[in-house]
Image: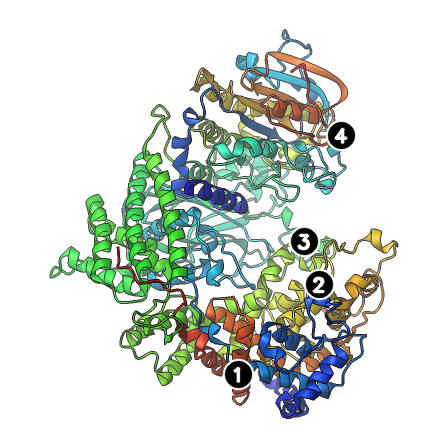
């Protein structure tokens, strides 16, 4: 009985705090205990990732010329060639309800909500809730972190909306992400030591609390009992954490900070995403590879212009060429993530098999800030419910929301509507 | 000079105050009026609404007799409050004359004060958990370590606006986790770590002007970041500054921008961004040029010792304009985007740890070092260190059981790496202990249920220090308490004086005053850039307003002035930013200094930016919020909550596109009968402050409606007001009402429990008694400390038999 009560209160507490408070060690050790292997037999995990890049794409370099299964891979998506059978390219979609003349600062807020930011909450309590958070309502309680919001830009974009008024801040510092995932302690050895220390602290404070209680009045004893209940709950988690039930998973040492080299930075963040899935610490991740109006320069690609000024290409072939290079590079670092989770075995399949990953942008033609047609691709198979290996092209003005709807629906997440969408696609 | 000049102007004020005092006849003088006359007043003016049938507000006075007060003191306390605020009978209803109201108040209060049934004031206060701020202060006092409570601990709940109310301070597993992990981190920070691994800290530029000097950085620099960091060990540290070369056409590239990195104000690195060479590079090498320029901002290496350091990254100021752009911008500091700026930097380290130098924390904690003092064994040294620390952390003498537990931690640490890890573990144990995290009051054995007893001297020491310092007691208090001398009235009064004189009592201004005046709201009022370009974004004055309010309140407390001076004092503390907001142009620089105010509209709390802003919206003033603030926080008569489903004012409801003044908007509002009963009281008070815009700046005109501001207001009793001076004078005419509100709040903060109707006789007693002492702050604090609420408890009625310690 007690455990149930505490679980509820902890959950409430966590929700109340949002993601602003770095979670300490003990909590971090639970995933080992609640790993997928422990969940009811036959129930495979459902994982979601929404990986977005800003400033859209040069569409004729994003979309393959042919549709169906036998298409030639486009220049931008070339790095995903090895994962072709897991890839579904979806063309022709428009995010009409979120279209706004207000560029950049607002457009990202519509990507996963299909609502203009100033209309959030107007059409009902779920209007403005992003689809990742709709998934969290159903799978978020099964893991320690209901969801993880990441970025590789300096600022924080607002992709994930828990409610029409609460967006979840993104973390861009790999060290902070690591500590969120695995707690304090930079090495396996340090973490083990901290765990042992914590065990003895909890033992001893219980003894002290008993002594404290003995001299107190009834009301105060209740406070101490609450305290003791909480201590025992943490103790239980520590005990479970010390039983490592996935010995194959190697957790690397904690990163020191944000690497100076961009490619290294991307790789580190995507590696952490892969680890979060593998260790089953969370099942829902949103990731902004950069923010709208970013001034990042891709000097590693010998491009000297800032990303945002470049994105207003004015149909200048040289600028468009450079944008294709950047977009291809984004796909390349993203493909590193797919490679990792494809290699990660889990049950009868791989982590990728159990995942549904949207890779795309909130924008189409960055020169005009429009949402039509959006670059979008799905990776993974939603536990066999998405076949993959094809390029599907829908007629103009088909709804982007229907794709988000499909992602949830194929994972058995009950959903009534996302923006203007009330149904999914059957072709995917 | 400044002070001399303005002394004259304050003299007439004091005279006016004196007169006002004479005119305010104490209500007690009417007490001889017969009870029948009072009952007749109630029947004549109250029962038409508050009768058995209508029962408005759930209250009836039908059939009131002399005995009614004793039967339902809670209702009558409410009634007194409404009468004192002159909000009942409501405006528009038939009103008794002022004398009759005073007389009724006096009779009711007298009856309430005489009620015998006041034992509840000594009820047990539930066990108290340290809150974030107390934790922060306690760690600073115990270990000289600065922690940010809001980063290491979950937020605390509040009750009646206070975050130190014991019953609201719950505990959940999350708290335990965070207290344990905070204990570990604090211990590492206090002692440093010989085997520290490299880690990274990221520092971002504060919102603010990057073209002017950042306080704390060397003079002659512009912009940049000054970061405080506590380094874990001696060794090499690296700095990576965020890229500055990000476009090929690099604005400002034609000028040399000399950049310096300082550690504790000494330059450890300098380089130049821009200038002729870089310009050539940009022209000729293009993308490679960016990397070459940015490379100068990376891997900046320098040695540093363990402990607190200040690290600065900034530009040397040029003798010419940094950028032409700002000439074209309206806002102060505009155009900065085009000149080079330090947006963030990352500090990494330590690499190649060379040792652990002495730091303030280490010197403070390691009072005994077995390596230096060979006459002592490490174990003896450890005991010496722990007994001093644990005594203050547990706020009592350390028992053998306590020491045995701490030494278990010590031994764990010794196994890991010797003496210092042992001390570190011991500190972790002390900080994770419920004896540190909780403070409670023990029930002595051998007393009957319901029997009253004083709390122990040690409990009193804790209560005092958490009240006055928001932290653990010091040695002197604990020593007096352990000799049972603290409860002696003269000693106690002297200790209160000593504690108030100590800098730690600043928390009364920064913590108590902020909670009393609901300054939390200021965090949410983010000024709207479209409406207030001169007071938003990098010109947002809120952080400086907070400093002003803290310094101003602290000066009234520290100088032991009449606390009514909070409403009328003609001095404040300003820096350039706040001064500009107040229209004062001869205060320069970022440092705050005491200034005497010529402009009487700025006197006292009602002229302070923090108050004016916290009771406004981000884009406009709110006479409602300001009126409510005055009633609730200064007069102590909280208006009723609005009925459910009240729409906010928006264009649709107003039905016109013409810009309306706030007064016109409010008139629409008060036209609704559901709103009018409270708003006719609140709004006219707020209107008197309409000359202050939502950012606290004076205005004569409404910029959007184009009309002259009308600051005509009205007191609940019908007195007409015009402008802030009138409003202040009106409040000052009844100083006891303000003092009562102050005392109520201070008592709540001191007790650490919610205040109840049965506390009111005590509050009134303090107000009466301190009137003879000119309502001096120390007298009020001493009176609060000597209440039964603070010092006495009674055994609960249902106290079970004491069980032996398990």
Foreground disc of the pair 2, 3? 2
The image position of residue A253, as x and y in percent, is 36, 34
Residue drawn at the location 44% of the way across and 19% of the way down: A346
Q: Which mark is residue B334?
A: 3
The image position of residue A376, as x and y in percent, is 65, 22
Of B205 and A194, nearer the camera is A194
In this rendering, would A33 be left or right of B592? Answer: left
Residue drawn at the location 43% of the way across and 66% of the way down: B125
Q: Which image quadrant is residue A324 in?
A: top right
Q: Chain of mark 4?
A: A
Q: Which mark is residue B694?
A: 2
In this rendering, does residue B214 appear at all? yes
Mark 4, residue position: A96
Marked residue nearer the N-terminal end (2 or 1): 2
Of B301 and B84, nearer the camera is B84
Height in image: A366 above or below B143? above
Q: Secondary structure at mark 2?
A: loop
Check disc 3: other Cα within 10 Å, few if <14, some if 14-19, many if 20+.
some
Residue that extends furthest to the top in the rendered view of this protein:
A70
């Amino acid at each position: 009985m007690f455990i149930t009560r505490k679980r509820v209160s902890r959950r409430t507490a966590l929700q109340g705090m949002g993601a602003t408070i770095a979670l300490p060690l003990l909590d971090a050790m639970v995933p080992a205990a609640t790993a997928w292997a422990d969940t009811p037999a036959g129930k495979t995990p459902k994982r979601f990732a929404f990986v977005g890049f800003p400033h859209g794409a040069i569409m004729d370099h994003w979309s393959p010329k042919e549709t169906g299964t036998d298409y030639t891979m486009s220049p931008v998506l070339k790095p995903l060639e090895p994962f072709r059978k897991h890839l579904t390219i979806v063309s022709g979609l428009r995010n009409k309800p979120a279209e706004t003349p207000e560029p950049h600062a607002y457009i990202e807020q519509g990507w996963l909500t299909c609502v203009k930011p100033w209309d959030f909450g107007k059409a009902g309590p779920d209007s403005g809730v992003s689809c990742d958070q709709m998934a969290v309502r159903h799978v978020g309680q099964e893991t320690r972190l209901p969801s993880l919001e990441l970025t590789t830009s300096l600022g924080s974009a607002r992709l994930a909306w828990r409610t029409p008024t609460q967006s979840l801040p993104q973390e861009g510092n790999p060290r902070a992400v690591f500590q969120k995932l695995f707690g304090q302690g930079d090495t396996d050895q340090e973490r083990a030591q901290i765990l042992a220390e914590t065990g003895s602290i909890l033992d001893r404070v219980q003894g002290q609390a008993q002594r404290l209680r003995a001299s107190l009045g009834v009301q105060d004893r209740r406070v101490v009992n609450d305290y003791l209940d909480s201590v025992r709950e943490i103790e239980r988690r520590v005990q479970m954490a010390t039983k490592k039930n996935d010995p194959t998973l190697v957790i690397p040492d904690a990163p020191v900070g944000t690497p100076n080299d961009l490619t290294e930075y991307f790789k580190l963040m995507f590696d952490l995403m892969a680890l979060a899935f593998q260790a089953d610490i969370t099942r829902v991740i949103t990731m902004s590879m950069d923010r709208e109006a970013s001034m990042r320069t891709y000097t590693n690609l010998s491009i000297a212009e800032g990303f945002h000024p470049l994105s207003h290409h004015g149909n200048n072939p040289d600028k468009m060429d450079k944008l294709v290079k950047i977009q291809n590079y984004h796909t390349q670092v993203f493909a590193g993530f797919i490679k990792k989770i494809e290699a990660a075995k889990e049950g009868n399949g791989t982590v990728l098999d159990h995942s549904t990953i949207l890779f795309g942008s909130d924008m189409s033609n960055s020169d005009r800030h429009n949402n039509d047609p959006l670059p979008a691709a799905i990776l993974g198979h939603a536990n066999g419910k998405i076949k993959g290996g094809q390029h599907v092209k829908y007629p103009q003005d088909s709804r982007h929301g229907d794709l988000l709807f499909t992602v949830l629906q194929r994972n058995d997440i009950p959903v009534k509507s996302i923006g203007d969408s009330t149904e999914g696609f059957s072709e995917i | 000079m400044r002070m001399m000049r303005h002394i004259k102007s304050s003299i007439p004020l004091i005279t006016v105050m004196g007169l006002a005092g004479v005119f305010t006849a104490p209500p007690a003088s009417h007490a001889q009026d017969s009870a029948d006359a009072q009952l007749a007043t109630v029947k004549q003016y109250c029962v038409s609404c508050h009768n058995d049938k209508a029962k408005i507000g759930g209250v009836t006075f039908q059939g009131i007799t002399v005995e009614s007060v004793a039967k339902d003191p809670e209702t009558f306390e409410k009634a007194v409050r409404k009468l004192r605020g002159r909000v009942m009978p409501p405006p528009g209803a038939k009103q008794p004359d002022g004398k009759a109201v005073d007389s009724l108040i006096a009779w009711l209060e007298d009856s309430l004060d005489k009620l015998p049934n006041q034992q509840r004031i000594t009820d047990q206060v539930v066990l108290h958990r340290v809150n974030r701020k107390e934790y922060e202060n306690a760690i600073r006092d115990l270990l000289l370590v600065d922690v940010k409570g809001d980063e290491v601990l979950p937020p605390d709940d509040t009750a009646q606006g206070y975050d130190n109310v014991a019953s609201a301070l719950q505990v959940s597993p999350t708290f335990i986790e965070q207290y344990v992990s905070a204990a570990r981190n604090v211990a590492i920070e206090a002692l440093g770590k010989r085997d520290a691994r490299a880690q990274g800290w990221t520092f971002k530029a504060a919102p603010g002007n990057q073209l002017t000097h950042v306080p704390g950085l060397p003079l002659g620099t512009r912009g940049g970041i000054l970061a405080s960091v506590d380094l874990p060990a001696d060794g090499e540290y690296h700095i990576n500054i965020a890229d500055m070369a990000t476009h090929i056409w690099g604005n400002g590239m034609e000028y040399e921008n000399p950049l310096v990195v300082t550690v504790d104000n000494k330059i450890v690195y300098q380089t130049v961004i821009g200038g002729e060479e870089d310009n050539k590079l940009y022209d000729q090498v293009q993308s490679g040029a960016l990397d070459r320029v940015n490379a100068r901002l990376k891997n900046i290496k320098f040695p540093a010792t363990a402990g607190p350091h200040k690290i600065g990254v900034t530009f040397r100021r040029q003798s010419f304009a940094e950028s032409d752009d700002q000439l074209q911008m309206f806002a102060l500091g505009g155009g900065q985007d085009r000149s080079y700026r330090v947006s963030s930097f990352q500090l990494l380290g330590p690499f190649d740890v060379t040792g652990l130098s002495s730091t303030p924390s280490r010197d403070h904690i390691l009072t005994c070092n077995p390596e230096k003092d060979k006459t002592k064994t490490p174990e003896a040294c450890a005991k010496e260190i722990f007994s001093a620390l644990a005594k203050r952390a547990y706020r009592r003498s350390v028992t053998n059981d306590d020491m045995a537990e701490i030494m278990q931690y010590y031994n764990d640490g010794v196994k890991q790496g010797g003496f210092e890890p042992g001390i570190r573990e011991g500190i972790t144990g002390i900080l994770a202990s419920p004896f540190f995290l909780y403070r409670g009051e023990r029930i002595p054995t051998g007393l009957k249920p319901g029997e009253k007893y004083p709390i122990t001297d040690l409990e009193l020491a804790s209560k005092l220090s958490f009240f006055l310092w928001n932290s653990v007691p010091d040695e002197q208090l604990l020593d007096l308490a352990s000799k049972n001398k603290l409860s002696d009235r003269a000693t106690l009064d002297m200790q209160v004086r000593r504690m108030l004189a100590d800098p730690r009592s600043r928390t009364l201004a920064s913590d108590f005053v902020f909670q009393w005046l609901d300054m939390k709201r200021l965090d949410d009022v983010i000024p709207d850039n479209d409406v207030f370009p001169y007071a938003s974004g990098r010109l947002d004055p809120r952080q400086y307003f907070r400093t002003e309010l803290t310094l101003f309140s602290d000066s009234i407390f520290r100088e032991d002035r009449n606390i009514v001076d909070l409403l009328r004092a003609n001095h404040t503390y300003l820096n350039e930013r706040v001064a500009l907001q107040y229209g004062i142009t001869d205060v320069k620089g970022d440092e705050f200094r005491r200034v005497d105010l010529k402009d009487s509209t700025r006197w006292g709390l009602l002229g302070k930016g923090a108050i004016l802003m916290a009771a406004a919206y981000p884009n406009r003033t709110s006479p409602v919020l300001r009126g409510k603030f005055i009633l609730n926080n200064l007069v102590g008569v909280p208006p009723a909550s609005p009925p459910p489903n009240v729409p906010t004012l928006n264009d649709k409801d107003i039905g016109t596109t013409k810009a309306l003044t706030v007064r016109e908007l409010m008139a629409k509002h008060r036209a609704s009968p559901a709103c009018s009963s409270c708003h006719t009281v609140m709004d006219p008070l707020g209107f008197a402050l309409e000359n202050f815009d939502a950012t606290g700046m004076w205005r004569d005109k409404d910029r959007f409606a184009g009309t002259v501001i009308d600051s005509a207001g009205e007191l609940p009793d019908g007195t007409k007001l015009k402008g802030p001076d009138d409003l202040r004078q009106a409040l000052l005419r009844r100083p006891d009402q303000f003092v009562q509100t102050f005392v109520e709040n201070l008592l709540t903060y001191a007790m650490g429990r919610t205040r109840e109707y049965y506390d009111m006789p005590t509050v009134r007693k303090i107000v009466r008694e301190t009137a003879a002492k000119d309502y001096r702050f120390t007298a009020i604090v001493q009176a609060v400390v000597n209440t039964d609420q603070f010092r006495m408890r009674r055994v609960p009625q249902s106290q079970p038999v004491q069980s032996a310690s398990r």
